[in-house]
Image (spheres, rainbow, N blue to C red):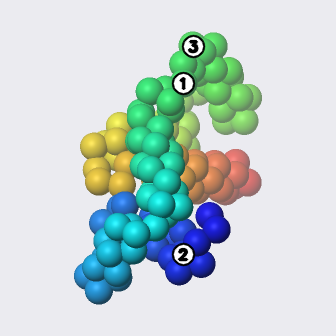
Amino acid sequence: MSCDKVDASLLQDFLESTIDPLEKIFVENHLKICKECRRELSELKLLLYDLDDKSNYVIDIPTELETMRDDIIDSFLGKRKSPSKKIIEMQIETVKTTGKFIEFLPGAKQAPKILKQASKGLKRGVKKIIAK
């Protein structure tokens, strides 16, 4: 963007409707006269449209992955259904359910980031249980 009157983050805030009312007026008036910023805003709209398209995030998880996960947990905790293993299984189901729920919330594009944080916490919890 070669226009030095409007910051690109201001255009993004304008597009996402998170802009202050005074700044919104400024951007609206600026867009009337600046072809470069209108082009930049159009590109941002296309980018947001692509990012909001949930079909881009659909990943087919192989069924073998759950078996592998169960085998790894069994190797650490043994074949018996220990209370620790039940807790781990409950946490896994909670993370899955949370992921499905988050898709319906405003700002769902943050879901991958939130799930990544949750999985880090889950991994730390498993390490603590194993250490005991």
- Closest to the observer, 88 or 62: 62
| Residue at horizontal 35 percent and vertical 81 percent from the top | 26
Residue 12: image location, x then y, percent: 45, 64
- Is 26 on the left-hand or right-hand side of 44? left
Local packing at callout 3 (Cα closer than 10 Å; few below 14, some 14-19, many 20+) is few
Which residue is the site of mark 2?
7
Q: Up-down: is 63 above or below 95?
A: above
Residue 123: image location, x then y, percent: 64, 49
Q: Secondary structure at mark 2?
A: loop
Local packing at callout 2 (Cα closer than 10 Å; few below 14, some 14-19, many 20+) is few
Which image quadrant: the N terminus? bottom right
Residue 19: image location, x then y, percent: 34, 75
Q: Secondary structure at mark 3?
A: helix
- Closest to the observer, 18 or 110: 18
- Is 27 on the left-hand or right-hand side of 59? left
Q: Which is closer to the viewer, label 3 or label 2?
A: 2
- Closest to the observer, 9 or 40: 40
Q: Which is closer to the viewer, label 1 or label 3?
A: 1
What's the residue type where badge 3 is placed?
Answer: Thr
Which residue is the site of mark 3?
63
Distance from label 3 to label 2 (Cα)?
47 Å
Q: Which is closer to the viewer, label 1 or label 2?
A: 2
Which residue is the site of mark 1?
59
